[in-house]
Amino acid sequence: MEAELIAVDNVVTMILWTKLFMEWQGYPIEKNILYQDNKSAILLEENGRKSAGKRSRAIDICYFFITDQVEKGNVKIKYCPTDDMIADFMTMPLQGEKFRKFRDLILGPQE
């Protein structure tokens, strides 16, 4: 789970930079939603140390930058089931029906 928190910490930084860049160009950003398929990670990201158990106490406090950004309303974290996580198309080797499902979502239906 620590690897997921580190990745989300990096992504939140990029989200905030992109949000500021777009707003400076005159494009207002109303919502920043980060989809996550790990419910335990969502609890840590939203609640910080309050949700940390014995096994997660070693996670460095710097990763709770995410919690701060959620509290400020700069980013919202929502649960997305693994079977619907479209990012898997770019990050995992997929086969069969799951590959076709995500391919069609990204590229449009294939004939």
Image (cartoon, rainbow, N blue to C red):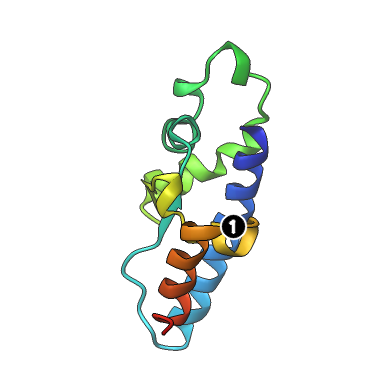
Residue 63 placement, left or right of 36: right
The local secondary structure at tag 1 comes to loop
The amino acid at mark 1 is Leu
As drawn, the residue found furthest toward the top would be: 54
Q: Residue at x 60, y 21 (%)?
A: 56
| Quadrant location of the N terminus in the rendered image | top right
Q: Between residues 57 and 86, which one lies in front from this camera angle?
A: 86
Q: In the rendered image, is residue 43 in sight?
A: yes
Q: Residue at x 53, y 15 (%)?
A: 53
| Quadrant location of the C terminus in the rendered image | bottom left
Q: Residue at x 35, y 79 (%)?
A: 28
Q: How many marks?
A: 1
Above or below for 24 versus 86: below
Name the image quarter holding residue 12: bottom right
Above or below for 37 versus 27: above
Q: Position of residue 103 (x, y in %)?
A: 49, 72
Q: Which residue is mark 1?
A: 94
Q: In the rendered image, is residue 87 in sight?
A: no
